[in-house]
Image (cartoon, rainbow, N blue to C red):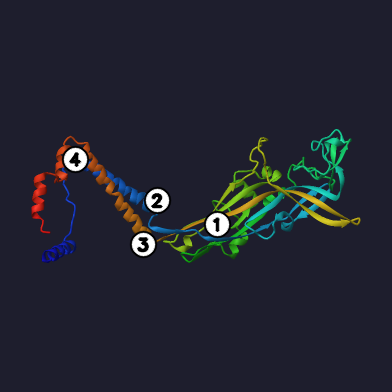
């Protein structure tokens, strides 16, 4: 029992009052030394250059919560079939609420005085030779109405129950009817909030005061912070010509980029505007495209001659999508320590590579193995170790 207590005391004493450290061997070899220092230098360059300078591993990041308000201004006029008309934002902006995504009408096809009735389909659609070719009550996905089962001999097309006269959208007005939209202006008001940092910024930065905003117009070189844009300039900066896009419509992405480093003065956090053409833009004439441009239809209903009538508008327009992308950065001790710790761990690669070279590549590898490792597998050593055991 006394011996067991002594063994336990010795074990606890060894555990609490002894420190173990691996034995190191100092090797004076130029090849291994150069390899080791080159690897360590590469790891150090990676930590400083990539982790800290390029990736900014010492900072915490956050994306912002954003809101966008838009307003289009400008007045244009058209002369369609001898009728002159003036268009203001209430007529050509869809929707009119000032959303971040909206359409400005640049061209249209007007079909007036439509009433519900029966009329023949246009040639090329629902062609027929007899009534048997027009199955009553059926629909065509690309048609304009419901088949009545009658083949109209004059047009050799099926008769439809639809809004008559039918819309003829084969001939798109060229030049576009509302080319004056090129000179309309777009005002964008954008605010971003970084909740983690408690910072809110607006694109109406300190340089934009009440006097400036009344006279400025965005220019990427002379006035890059002005929030008022000429539609023609937006299309041009996107890489397109306004007349080409205005004919059949298109889509443009206006990107507001907030990339901010809050380790500096918050006033240095300013927006950058970029412009990109999106889907369906007829940049070049290509008949092989499945769908080009951007268009939609809407109708105005009214009563005339004691029956419901409507005026149908097929609108071709440029769709603008205001897209906000953001990234805020600020120093934080936790990612800094994490980056340093991971970098220190990578330094171990140098030891592994140098050991491989030392023990398996160099001519004197057997000598270095004997110096690095202590072999204890002989019977005499095992017997001597057992005789020294106290417990």
Q: Is residue 193 above or below residue 236?
A: below
Residue 333 is tagged as 3
Q: Quadrant of residue 241?
A: top right
Per the image, the residue denoted by label 4 is 30
Q: CA distance from mark 2 to mark 4?
A: 33 Å
**Residue at the top extreme, as displayed:** 129
Using the image as rendered, state which of residue 66 and residue 161 is in the foreground: 161
Q: Secondary structure at mark 3?
A: helix
Q: Give the alpha-carbon distance from disc 1 to disc 4, as whole Å.
A: 59 Å
Circle 2 sits in a helix, a strand or a loop, which is it?
Answer: helix
Question: First in sequence: mark 1 or mark 3?
Answer: 1
In the foreground, 240 or 209 = 240
Identify which residue is drawn at 63% across, 40% down: 283
**Labelled disc at residue 308:** none
Marks 1/3 in contact by CB < 8 Å: the verdict is: no
Q: Secondary structure at mark 1?
A: loop
- The tally of labels here is 4
- Give coordinates of residue 211: x percent, y percent: 60, 64
């Amino acid at each position: 029992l006394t011996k067991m207590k002594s063994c336990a005391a010795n074990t606890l004493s060894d555990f609490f009052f002894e420190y173990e450290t691996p034995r190191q061997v100092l090797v004076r070899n130029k090849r291994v030394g150069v390899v080791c220092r080159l690897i360590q230098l590469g790891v150090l360059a990676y930590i400083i250059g990539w982790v800290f300078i390029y990736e900014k591993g010492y900072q915490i990041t956050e994306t912002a919560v954003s809101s966008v308000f838009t307003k289009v201004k400008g007045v244009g006029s058209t002369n369609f079939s001898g009728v002159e008309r003036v268009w203001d934002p209430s007529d050509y902006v869809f929707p009119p609420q000032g959303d971040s995504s909206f359409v400005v009408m640049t061209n249209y096809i007007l079909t007036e005085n439509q009433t519900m009735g029966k009329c023949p389909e246009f040639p090329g659609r629902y062609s027929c030779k007899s009534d048997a070719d027009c199955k009553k009550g059926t629909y065509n996905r690309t048609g304009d109405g419901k088949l009545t089962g009658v083949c109209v001999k004059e047009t050799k097309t099926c008769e439809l129950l639809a809004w008559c006269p039918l819309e003829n959208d084969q001939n798109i007005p060229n030049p576009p009817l509302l080319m004056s939209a090129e000179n309309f202006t777009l005002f964008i008001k954008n605010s971003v909030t970084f909740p983690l940092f408690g910072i809110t910024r607006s694109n109406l930065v300190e340089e934009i005061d009440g006097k400036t905003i009344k006279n400025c117009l965005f220019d990427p070189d002379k006035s890059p912070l002005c929030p008022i844009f000429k539609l023609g300039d937006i299309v041009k900066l996107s890489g397109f010509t306004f007349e080409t896009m205005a004919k059949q419509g298109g889509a443009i992405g206006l990107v507001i980029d907030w990339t901010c480093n809050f380790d500096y003065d918050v006033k240095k956090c300013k927006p950058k505007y970029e412009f990109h053409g999106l889907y369906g833009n007829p940049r070049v004439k290509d008949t092989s495209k499945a769908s080009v441009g951007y268009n939609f239809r809407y109708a105005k209903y009214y009563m005339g001659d004691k029956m419901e009538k409507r005026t149908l508008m097929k609108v071709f327009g440029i769709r603008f999508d205001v897209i906000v992308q953001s990234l805020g950065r600020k120093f934080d001790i936790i990612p800094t320590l994490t980056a340093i710790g991971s970098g220190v761990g990578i330094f171990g690669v140098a030891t592994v590579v140098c050991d491989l070279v030392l023990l398996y590549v160099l001519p004197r590898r057997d000598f270095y193995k004997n110096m690095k490792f202590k072999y204890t597998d002989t019977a005499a050593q095992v017997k001597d170790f057992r005789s020294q055991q106290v417990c």
